[in-house]
Image (cartoon, helix red, strand yellow):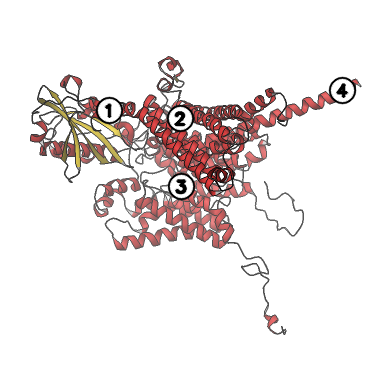
Amino acid sequence: MRLETPAAQCGPFAHDLVSIPRTMGLVMLALAPATLFGLWQFGWPAIWLFLATLAGALLAEILSLWLAGKPIRPDLSDGTALLTGWLLAMTLPPWAPWWIGVVGALLAIVVAKQVFGGVGQNLFNPAMVARVALLIAFPLEMTSFVAPTPLFSAEAPGLVESLAITFGGQGFDAFSGATVLGQVRTELGQGETLATILPDLYTPLSGAVGTVAGSLGETSALLLLLGGLFLLYKRVITWHIPVALLGTIAVLATLMHLIDPEHYAGPLYHLVSGATLLGAFFIATDPVTSPVSARGQLLFGAGCGLLIYVIRTWAGYPEGVAFAVLLMNACAPLIDHYVKPRIYGRDRRGRPLEYANDAETPR
Amino acid sequence: MSLLAVLNQRQSIAYQATLLGGFTLLAAALLVIGDLTTRDTIALRKAEDLKASLSQVLPPALHDNNLLADPLTLPDADGAPVLVYRARRGLEVTGVAYRVSGPGYSGTIELILGVDPQGRVLGARVLSHTETPGLGDKIELAKDDWILAFDGLSLGDPPPERCAVKKDGGDFDQFSGATITPRAVVGALKRGLEFFQRHQVALTAPAAVSVASDPVRSPE
Amino acid sequence: MSLEPNTANKTAWGRISRDGLWSNNVVLAQSLALCPLLAVTGTATNGLGMGLATTAVLIASGFLIALIRGWVTPEVRIPIFVLVIAVLVTLVDLGMNAWLHDLHKMLGLFIPLIVTNCAILGRAESFASRNGAGASAFDGLMMGLGFTLALVLLGAVREIIGSGTLFANASLLLGEGMAFLEMTLIPDYRGFLLAILPPGGFIALGFILAGKRLIDTRLAEARQRRESTAGAGALAGS
């Protein structure tokens, strides 16, 4: 699947130094700051979970390539399996037991990727398939979040203690903390208003920096934004999907907030909470599962944003990025069918363009 | 053309209409036979089901009457009818049982609640629910003995303000990861006890005549 | 391997059996009846109960439709077949409600829904309306057993992965004597809810279909190899 191989059979093919390993490397580099922050903030149990998930993803990839009788080295070293495992780990509750990461990695690689034919063939984003499957299969483990206890701080669990949490199935009720999105949903359900809920729980600053309970790599909005801008600068992704996604959420949140500020939080809350930024820059932009054309990508991003807002506000779950991305993944082929890029030399309907000098020729 | 000749023409509308009509009649006859054969058994099974769920909240030691006989119909707070089954020893009412329900996380939770004449909970059991398996289904006795915590409680015990899950400042445990489900059950049982309080006189009035009847004919 | 009407009956019976159980299996080959399949196969016992109920309907409908096929004209055959099937399903529903009440409570809505199982009308159309009563009843039996096989297989996979047991509550279906079937394969298992929910059914069915394809391919390869070596041997011998 490497693009640098001289595979041109006919026609003018443009060649570039773009290759899958290079792209994956850039994405991982962009993810690194937010990941390191998450690992520092949630300590050893998060580090073990992260490593277990990556190892699970690599093993699952080797296993499925071996079963399918494909060469293992080239596909394994392109880094896609590693990135899938990485993205999945970012969305897990940081102190989840190791088998959550491993089962999730198996689901992502085997069920969501290799069954469809491997790299570039999958219809759905593998990391999000795994996340949704885990959420449905293990609701308790997938909703047990912890308050931040930074590495080496007094209350953080030590190396040995953390092994018991990740691998020994030891409970951690003493550390438990609800995510901002989850807590707000619960208390709104009890008839509280945002004015009484939010101040205790969250400030825009804590949400942006990320010192709140949440998934392993989703808490720090600023670092994720930084990574996203880096990807834009390196032209790994284009602006269309992130801007459409974030813009739709911001517009909807602003509208609803203006209508009823007691029950609908403002745009900043939605942008810095949960997986919004991770989803906008790293997940919805997956080139395999999103539309090809710029207009299609705008539509795709707006659809994701709309679904995220609707699910967070009115549906049964407090967070909806994974569901929204999967639902829009399913729509991507349809979008590609109807929103085709214009063919060179023809108009949008496929008819040959009429040139200005045609006007001079008599008909 | 004689009738037989018409029927022999298989393409004719008459033949096909007769055929369809004949089969419909035959089908109806078969269904009637099937219904007659199974009706009594099915009614018996349903009565057994109801009796089984009633006996979970009305211990057999408490009564010597047929629980399904002469149920009482009383209006609840919204005026909707509630069917109440009474356990008696002799003519004395020793307990009543009725359905209560509350809005759970993903649908209505139906419970059956047994109450003794003093208004204390004899037992409560979940009849049906659509809560998340693994999270909210601990309200089932088969999964967890949480529901047994209500036995022996009444409207004043615990005091009304403590009659809630711990997260809301009350006395009852919630489950880790699920608050809405136990909250719905606590609310439903509280409303059930209020219903008892409202109708205590009617509910505990001793029977004038002990009615004997067979379970098959009693209403469901 | 064609079925000539006058060849020895043995071939016909064998072919019907192979068709129903494997090569033309309702689920594994025709991909029919997926709705009841996915809905009831949370446990192997439910799958078995549903499969046996469907088999009963298939046998009876095949038999009855083959009997009446001489009178029914093509124009009204579909309503009549549907009527026959609907009556049979209703009778099975009533019977199970009365005599297998606990299983009926578990399968609930899906017993009346057997009537919408396209495999039944499909067999009525493609087999029973063209063959004798005995052969049609046998075809119904084999198709039903094939369907039951798929249901039990899928139910077992989902039950083992989903709740770590096998044939839980089998005594409700088969009587106390079969209680030994109820197994707990993985003690203290936390459960994998996804496998029991419908999406898990789809995923497991996908893997089972892939498995059948794999077996078929391997068998075909083996047969080819055998034929080619036999051919080579014949050549060498000549």
The image quadrant of residue A112 is top right
Foreground residue among A334 and A241: A334
Identify the residue under disc 2: C162
Q: Is residue B147 left or right of residue C50?
A: left
Tell me the kind of residue under disc 3.
Answer: Ala
x and y, in percent, of residue A164 in the image: 41, 27
Q: Are marks 1 and 3 on the same chain?
A: no
Tell me the kind of residue under disc 4.
Answer: Ala
Label 4 SS: helix
Label 1 SS: helix
> 10 Å neighbourhood of mark 2: few (<14), some, or many (≥20)?
many
Report in which chain the residue with disc 2 lies: C
Label 3 SS: helix
x and y, in percent, of residue B38 in the image: 36, 28
Q: Marks 1 and 3: CB-CB under 8 Å?
A: no
Report in which chain the residue with disc 4 lies: C
Report in which chain the residue with disc 3 lies: A
Q: Are marks 4 and 3 on the same chain?
A: no
The image quadrant of residue B153 is top left
> 10 Å neighbourhood of mark 3: few (<14), some, or many (≥20)?
many
Q: Marks 4 and 2: CB-CB under 8 Å?
A: no
Q: Is residue A77 above or below residue A264?
A: above
Tell me the kind of residue under disc 2.
Answer: Gly
Q: Are marks 4 and 1 on the same chain?
A: no
Identify the residue under disc 3: A322
Question: Disc 4 and disc 2: Cα gap in Å?
Answer: 53 Å
| Residue A217 visible here | yes
Identify the residue under disc 1: B47
Question: Disc 2 and disc 3: Cα gap in Å?
Answer: 23 Å
> 10 Å neighbourhood of mark 4: few (<14), some, or many (≥20)?
few
Residue at 21% x, 32% y: name it. Answer: B113
